Image (tube, rainbow, N blue to C red):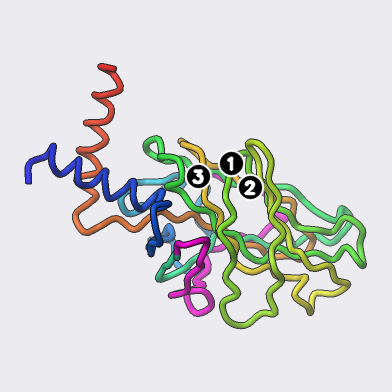
Amino acid sequence: MNASAAVTALLAGTLLAIAPSAGAATIPLSWMQMTPTPFGGTPPNGSSYNVPGVGLVQINYTVTPSFSTARLNQTPIFGGDSITSGPNTYTWGPVELFARSNLVAPPPPTLAWSITYTFPTTMAANSVYLGVVGLGRLDQTLPGAISTCQVSQNGTYLGQDFGVGGPWGPNQFSSGPGTFSLQNAVSGPTTAGPNWNSALALVQINDAINSLTVNFNQVSGDGVGLNIAVITPAPGAAAVLGLGGVALTRRRRTA
């Protein structure tokens, strides 16, 4: 197959995978892996990690001594699971998280921080997925003590994975033009119930993006985790994606 035909075939497959509205589809996702940072270690601020089919993605996050930060292996809890949304089923293998815990005693009830993922190229609309888990709330004991996650992009909530263990609380997803947010849907007075940990939420980013910033307000004592995922590329697709990128760029310049 020549380069032009390869690009055409890849783009056709990619478009079907990204927007499979014509019929039911199984869509395999790959979560970003923060190798070589060891599990339990702290991902360095400003570090870059390889995402299959995308390249190096840089992470920058708010550095504060009042938070602990670690790369966590969550495969025993959420690995090999799936979420069905409409006719489509989203599947994945290993799962890991960028995890942070707020170690400051109240007041205040929450502290703010953010993380930004910067991509090596513009990511197509609907090609990036965000996973968030562990949002807690103690607002029955401390007014305003609700961990929230907010993103200034359009997003589609695909569902949630309750994994094993728990208890997990269901997610409350809210959205408006250019923004969406997540929080635990269950209110509670202690850290022993489903109010303390939300299930793994999966949100599809509907915009074309060069970077993705995720903002948190986090309850004292609460630990939350997140990661990004992309559609798993077919074998050998990474090199073709590079050719496709060049071809698409040239088309834009001559249009």
Residue farthest along the top direction in this orientation:
254
Circle 1/circle 2 CB separation < 8 Å = no
Q: Name the residue located 62 percent from the left edge and 64 percent from the top edge.
A: 133
Ranked by sequence position, the earlier of labels 1 and 2 is 2
Q: Name the residue located 19 percent from the left edge and 41 percent from the top edge.
A: 7
Real-space CA distance between mark 2 and mark 3, rounded to the nearest whole angstrom: 15 Å
Q: Where, by quadrant of the figure, is residue 125 drawn?
A: top left
Q: What stretch is highlighted in magenta?
A: 59-88
Q: Which amino acid does label 2 sit on?
A: Val
Looking at the image, residue 236 sits to the left or right of residue 207; the answer is left
The residue at which mark 2 appears reads as: 63
Q: Which mark is residue 117?
A: 3
Residue 57, given in percent of the width and then of the height, sits at: 41, 46
Q: Which amino acid does label 1 sit on?
A: Asn
Looking at the image, residue 119 sits to the left or right of residue 130; the answer is left
Looking at the image, residue 136 sits to the left or right of residue 252; the answer is right
Q: Name the residue located 37 percent from the left edge and 36 percent from the top edge.
A: 121
Q: Residue 154 carries which label?
A: 1
Real-space CA distance between mark 1 and mark 3, rounded to the nearest whole angstrom: 16 Å
Question: What secondary structure is marked by label 2?
Answer: loop
